[in-house]
């Protein structure tokens, strides 16, 4: 796991109390690991994370905002074939 993945994992253990802090955390995750997709006039957002804790944290943050999402797992095709987590 890279240093940034270790950092995301550590930050996922901290639950900020203020709403603005939760929005900032979610924004940072999307800036670092997110992708936007336009499909048939709708916008889909995907997060691709190496840490299960960060994926669960992002899922909880999205749920608090009323955004439906799901977590999917896959094996990375390169190097160590580590499990990756995607939020759709």
Image (cartoon, grey):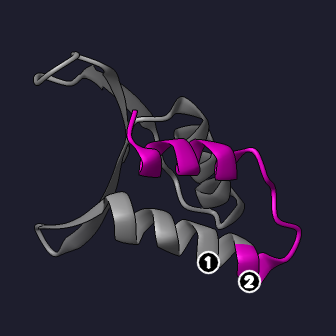
Residue at numbered disc 1: 24
**Where residue 42 sits: x, y (%)?**
23, 71
Task: Give the residue drawn at x 52%, y 53%.
Answer: 68
**Which one is in front, 82 or 37?**
82
Is 63 situated above or below 71?
Answer: below
| Left or right, 23 with reference to 55 | right
| Left or right, 33 with reference to 67 | left
Task: Give the residue drawn at x 11%, y 68%.
Answer: 40
Is 80 situated above or below 8?
Answer: above
Which image quadrant for residue 16? bottom right
**Where residue 62 sits: x, y (%)?**
59, 59
For the residues bearing labels 2 and 1, Cβ distance under 8 angstroms: yes
**Which one is in front, 5 or 15?**
5
Real-space Cα distance between discs 2 and 1? 6 Å
Label 2: which secondary element: helix
Q: Which residues are magenta?
A: 1-21
Asked if the magenta segment contains residue 58, the reply would be no
Q: Residues within 10 Å of mark 2 (few under 14, many from 20)?
A: few
| Left or right, 27 with reference to 18 | left
Residue at numbered disc 2: 20
Label 1: which secondary element: helix
**Which one is in front, 30 or 43?**
30
| Left or right, 3 with reference to 57 | left
Task: Give the residue drawn at x 16%, y 75%.
Answer: 41
Quarter containing the N terminus: top left
Q: Residues within 10 Å of mark 1 (few under 14, many from 20)?
A: few
Mark number displayed over residue 37: none
């Amino acid at each position: 796991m890279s240093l940034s993945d270790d950092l995301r994992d550590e930050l996922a253990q901290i639950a900020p109390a203020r709403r603005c802090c939760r929005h900032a955390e979610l924004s940072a995750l999307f800036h670092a690991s997110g992708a936007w997709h336009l499909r048939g006039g709708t916008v889909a957002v995907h997060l691709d994370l190496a840490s299960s804790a960060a994926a669960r944290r992002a899922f909880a943050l999205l749920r608090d905002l009323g955004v439906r999402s799901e977590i999917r797992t896959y094996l990375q095709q390169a190097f160590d074939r580590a499990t990756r987590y995607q939020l759709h």
